[in-house]
Amino acid sequence: MESGTQQSERLRDTMSRYKQIIYHLLATFRAPPKLNMTSSTGAQGPPDPLLNLLSTSFAPAIRNISDLSDVSELCSNAFPTVIYNESEKQEVQQWLSKSTGYLQGPNKTKLNEAVTSLNQHLSSRTTLLGSKPSPADLAVYARLAPSVRNWTSKEQTGEEGHHHVVRYLDFVQNSSIFGLTLQKADKLDIDSNDVQFIPKAFDAKQEKDRKKKERASMAILEGDTKKLGIHAGKERTADVSDKVPLVQREKSEKKSSKSSKNPKQPSASVDVPLTPSLIDLRVGHILKATTHPNADSLYVSTIACGDPPDSDNTTIYEGDGRTVVRTVCSGLNGLIPLDEMQGRRVIVVCNLKPVTMRGVKSAAMVLAASPRTEAGVDSHAGPVELVTPPDSALVGARVKFEGWDGEVRGLLNPKKKIWESCQVGFTTNSKREVIFEAAKVEGLTEEEKGRQPAPLIAEGPTSGVCTVKSLEGAVVR
């Protein structure tokens, strides 16, 4: 049995240990310092909701940050596994500044204009940068959510509502890529079953017909003889043209317009010397990617490739009603996460014959790399990495192997095996650059086979080399 003295000493020891534990917890979970969030004018306003969001969800990451103007530090601390290039950091800075306009204030007109602009921006993006999470998303969510909380169902998803903004905010508050620590009561209450207006499915053919009729009607009203195919000063021709049905004149106009906008490229079916320059490689931008409805291994991507309007095998993107896009099926489901497909730029092969894959017509092919395997081994087992153009390359820019100049041909004739013959030489070097090794390609001259490996270059104001993330000596196709 313990004496009174022993009991007192044991109690003091226990209290001492408790104090140490409490001090340790306080040191570990101490609140982050106040961040410099004054307005550009230096005026102190109401508390910024971004501060609260950062404090509750990213306390360890922002503990040593004293100023949100340091975008590089904020990006690396909040999302340490995400790599941002300089242009993306600049865009984050712009959105951090722009997002202050989403704070509730007396000027509702300016807020509505800002939200409308944001809704348009998000029509073809998962996040503000396309697919990458960034502090800009946190700022927009924190500062805009209080206003959206007061929106009616009609303002959220009505015919004049901001569908893309609502979808985006719901994604930010629930997606694991952001990892926000929010109580249920703090989240926006978005009911996916309470959609007031469902936009009508976009019909590209119907839209083309409508625009043609508009042009023809305007030409009649304005007396534009050129658009109607009437030669000024030739009354007889004009008389005859007036008797031609409008539909027939529209067809003539379409043929003339299409030939001027989209001049035919030389056909690749004509016998020409084999060269990789025959392949139409371009920089593409994936505006949207979904899983194929009838095939588990396929994605269906909507890709802008810089095609002119009315080009063959293209449609108009339903997200904005103006961007010319191609539908592309790729066997990347299970090899590349769908989130990584959204909004990213890729290299697209644009003159292969379109193929219908499980009911969906695919009008191009996305270039990707995979490890070189031995004969008999499954070469589609992964890993797979998409070929990435340089940051400076513009969407639609031509991509070619350095030193292999020549005209891009029209649709490649599958019987000529031009793509299959040249693709054998597509690989990557130790710098993870995509290159063309002519020595591996049958059908080239001996002189051409002796050329040094040529890097894949995206043309533009400042050309750059196309690369993959990590694979060396890979098969590129």
Image (cartoon, helix red, strand yellow):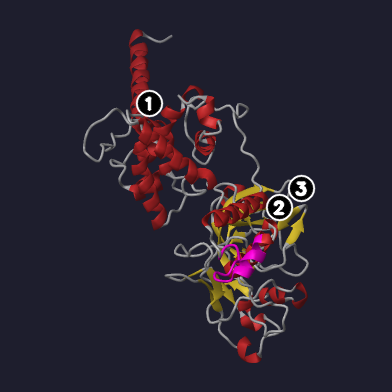
The answer to whether the residues at label 3 and label 1 have Cβ atoms under 8 Å apart is no
Residue 327 at what x, y percent from top left? 66, 55
- The magenta stretch is 226-242
Question: Which residue is under mark 1?
Answer: 21
Residue 390 at what x, y percent from top left? 48, 65
- Lower sequence index among marks 1 and 2: 1
- Lower sequence index among marks 3 and 1: 1
Residue, x 43% and y 53% (percent of image)? 84
Please, what is the three-letter code of the amino acid marked with disc 3?
Asn
Q: CA distance from mark 2 to mark 3?
A: 9 Å
Q: CA distance from mark 3 to mark 1?
A: 58 Å
Disc assigned to residue 298? 2
Query: In the image, which is nearer the foreground, mark 3 or mark 1?
Result: 3
Question: Which residue is under mark 3?
Answer: 294
Q: Nearer the viewer, residue 371 or 277?
A: 277
Q: Nearer the viewer, residue 389 or 164?
A: 164
Residue 54 visible in the picture = no
